[in-house]
Image (spheres, grey):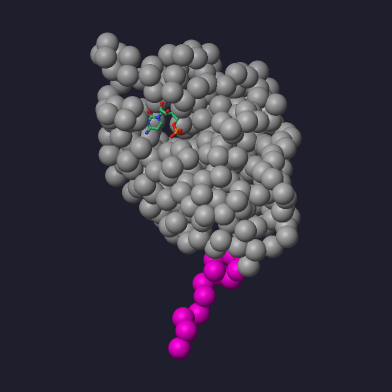
Amino acid sequence: MTEPLDQEEYERPRLGTLGPVRVRVPAKINLHLHVGPVRSDGFHELVTVYHAISLYDELSVRRGDRLTLTMEGEGAGELAGDDDNLVLRAARALARYTQREPLARLHLRKQIPVAAGLAGGSADAAAALVACDALWGTNLSRDELASVAGTLGSDVPFLVLGGTALGTGRGERVSPVLASSHSWHWVVAVAGLGLSTPTVYRELDHLREYGAARESVGAPDRLLAALRQRDPLVLAAALGNDLQPAALSLRPELRRTLEAGHDAGALAGIVSGSGPTCVFLATDARHAEALAKELVDSGTCRSAQPAHGPVPGARVV
Ligand code: C5P
């Protein structure tokens, strides 16, 4: 007797298609980010809790006689259109792994801000893997996709998976921490200027060297317990990010954004990943709407919008 396929298997295309294949991929925030020492490969050992939120990029892919990429939307003009582009690198990496030619026409619609600490570039790479896998009918397992994803960037495997997950290693080893339908409500406040991730990690190293860094957030036990309790006030008290002091040191004006969120009644405010985006926890969807409006009115950020999480990772729509 054959095992019944689960919902996920039903949704995955079984054969290559002429396209277009459309894939939607979320942004991520880090509910907990412990940064350990620098490793010999230049990366830092992490223990992080990733959380995918309802702010999406969309990639559509169709057959072509070469590999091409066009882009539109939020910050698309700032992205590399050449070999450094993570979408093209992802398509090539999947083609190499499955021993085929990387032939596809890709079009990316961006809504996730660039260089914002929301893993927009990694999200696009995850979308390219899932989209080309469907277009080419290579039908890799999620584990295989995650292993190709890990070669492209530390956050890419999480964006294939989505939900809420524990990340270890340099962030590329992920395992789901919660299979719950409970939704958390956030406001994502985007700054005017982006921040480079390596610069923020270097700043943390400098702060630590001079004894100026805060004590690390340590292990994520309290955060994981808070997620199970489903009480936003408990979660608010458990959020933590070792990169926050480094982002604030490089961008002191982010303190004003965090203060504005606090004054507007956010349950908590935190720099997302390496920043400069700040995310605020709200009680519910209405509270998030009201907070977003007050943050925009405060003039301390470029934009502020409500989002909820967890949501699935890169998926064909
Ligand atoms: O893996 P990814 O390409 O996203 O990393 C971007 C940069 O962020 C790395 O080149 C490194 O400077 C820094 N980083 C780090 N430790 C990690 C993840 C990223 O130092 N665990």
Assign the magenta stretch its main secondary structure.
loop
Location of residue 3 in the rendering, given as x and y in whole percent from the top left corner: 46, 81
Front residue (pair 112, 251): 112
Classify the position of the C terminus by image quarter: bottom right
Question: Is residue 191 placed above or below 63 in the rendered structure?
Answer: above
Q: Is residue 41 visible?
A: yes
Front residue (pair 143, 64): 64
Location of residue 16 in the rendering, given as x and y in whole percent from the top left corner: 65, 63
Classify the position of the N terminus by image quarter: bottom left
Please tell me which residue is depicted at 55% across the width and 28% down the height of the picture.
116
Q: Quadrant of residue 194?
A: top right
Location of residue 13 in the rendering, given as x and y in whole percent from the top left corner: 62, 65
Please tell me which residue is depicted at 32% across the width and 41% down the height of the picture.
169
Q: Which residues are magenta?
A: 1-14
Q: Residue furthest bottom?
A: 1
Question: Is residue 35 placed above or below 206 in the rendered structure?
Answer: below
Front residue (pair 1, 210): 1
- Judged left or right of residue 285, residue 158 is left
Displayed-image quarter of ligand 1: top left
Magenta stretch contains residue 241: no
